[in-house]
Image (cartoon, grey):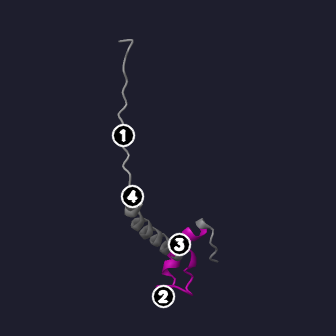
Amino acid sequence: MSEHAISTTPEVAVPAIPLRDLAPWAVLFGLIALLALFFISADQGAVSIPAGTAVHEWVHDGRHLLGFPCH
């Protein structure tokens, strides 16, 4: 084994993503997150988009996990 072993680490180029390309995706995922938050937090039947309590039953455990009361 040589005393002068050379260790090289490869350089990784990190691409720069312009904000103009990223903004539409951020808006889309923000709207999806708001829609999910609506179904988890506010859907008690009074402002329910689908009629009935099906959505409430599907997200019931998620409501408790996030601290929303529902009983």
Residue that badge 1 annotates: 12
Which quadrant is the N terminus positioned in?
top left
Residue that badge 3 annotates: 37
Q: Check residue 17 for magenta coloring.
A: no
Amino acid at dot 2:
Ala
Residue that badge 2 annotates: 51
Residue that badge 4 annotates: 18
Calculate the distance from the C-alpha at mark 3 to the C-alpha at mark 4. 29 Å
Q: Residues within 10 Å of mark 2 (few under 14, many from 20)?
A: few
Residue shown at the point (60%, 68%) measured from the top left: 64
Q: Between disc 2 and disc 4, whose residue precedes?
A: 4
Image: magenta residue range: 39-64
Calculate the distance from the C-alpha at mark 3 to the C-alpha at mark 2. 18 Å
Q: Residues within 10 Å of mark 3 (few under 14, many from 20)?
A: few
Residue shown at the point (53%, 76%) measured from the top left: 38
Q: Nearer the viewer, mark 4 or mark 1?
A: 4
Amino acid at dot 4:
Pro
